[in-house]
Image: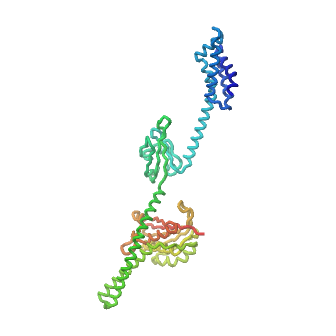
Amino acid sequence: MLESLAPTYRGLFERYLCAGDDLQREDVLLAASELAKSLLPHVISLDDMLGLHQRTQARLAEDWRTAPAGSPHAQAHGRLAAGDATPLMLAAMLPRQLQEAREARRRWQEEHGKVLVMFEQTDDFVLVFDAQGQLDYLNPAFRRATHWRLHQARARQADLWPTALPAQHTGHWTTEQACADGTRFPATWSISPIRDQDGQLLSHVCIGRDITPLRRLEERVRQNDKLRAVTTLAAGVAHDFNNLLGSIIGLAELCALQAEAGSLQARNLGGILQASHRAAGLVKELLNFARETPLQRQPVALGEWLHHCEPLLAVSLPRHVPLRIELRQDAVAMIDAARIEQVLLNLVKNAGYAMRERPGEVRLVVDRVCTQEHPEAARIQVIDQGEGISPDDLPHIFDPFFTTKPTGDGSGLGLSAAHGIVRHHGGQLEVASTPGVGTAFTLLLPLGG
């Protein structure tokens, strides 16, 4: 292609060097530029254009070397030797340079646009700091989670990002991320310094995410491990203690038969038997807590089922506390009805205990919910208007042997057992409480067919 253009370019070369004034040279430069524009569709490189110019220049220099002194060609040869043809070369290369610059800018904008779209649409947090460490960008995911706006975050950058940015290598940082309203949540960050080809620092890109769900999962795993260890211990202790109690109760009953009615000895033996039977009840609770028998699950319509359970649940409440069932939305749950009845009985008894000296009612509310962990679930809420649970006690409410009741009124195993039963169903047992207002226990159970 270029060889076929060689005569045309040689003609422009001769006209330029032999031109008598600047106007004529300007006309030649425009013609050279138009020629170069016509070559753009053929994707001829700048190196090829430079080669054409250099070859044409060499041939003209050879042809004009012997031109008579004072002739136009001899004068043109002198201009050629002085480098006066450089503007012609630049005019011939300029269209290709401009096109390559436009193409480079288009590619940069396209790539930058892709990166920006990724930053804008990702659920991860993205922050970009400039080389001086000033916040330059924050993405929508970070804005939604923290409510920081860019101008606001720049003004309070020390609150938003209190740590130093690494200058050399990618760093990792776990922190309590500050939000615009002063609240915090746990977050983990990967911080990467970005450098140009010369090694100069351009910016820092920080990628992060909220690890609250991970912390909750870790806490749940710890609780399950603790519960499993306590279960194993409880089972071993209960079996051995049950054997001892059998001997104690048996011997006490034999002695009671021989004791004189109404004597001090008979009263003492009665106290021993009473305490032993209470201990036997505690052992039974321990065995129930430790026993993980297979669930007999089947689809159960909660509205009808709770209607049948209502008399048993109501009788566990103090006489002045009524039980009310609210069926906001019926649901069929896949449950072991006997085990879930045990859970509800425990929760209703606790609600009644919390209202033993307070007016009000206990409500069982049934509906369906969608949560992040349970996209479809049946929900049963046990809501009382009792004395509530203190914030210090609330995190431990499902711990084995933990109880807020006075000594002798509770073993501390009821809620732990209830939590375990719901967990074995693949569900979740949650609690919310406000001291002086009341408590709500929430069962999330898998839906049935």
Q: Quadrant of the N terminus?
A: top right
Q: Position of residue 358 (x, y in %)?
A: 43, 72
Residue found farthest to the top? 69
Which is more toward the observer, 248 or 322?
248
Q: Residue furthest left?
A: 264
Residue 237 horizontal side relative to residue 58, left or right: left
Horizontal and vertical percent position of residue 307: 55, 76
Q: Residue at x 43, y 51 (%)?
A: 175
What residue sits 68% from the left and 29% below the top? 39
Camera sees residue 358: no
Give the image quarter of residue 58: top right
Residue 231 percent coordinates (x, y): 42, 70
Q: Is residue 33 above or below residue 321?
A: above
Q: Quadrant of the C terminus?
A: bottom right
388 in relation to 19, above or below: below
- Looking at the image, how many numbered discs can be counted on the residues? 0
54 left or right, relative to 352? right
Residue 388: x, y in percent? 43, 67
Could one spot residue 370 in this view of the protein? yes
Specify how the rendered protein is coloured.
rainbow
Q: Is residue 84 above or below residue 445?
A: above
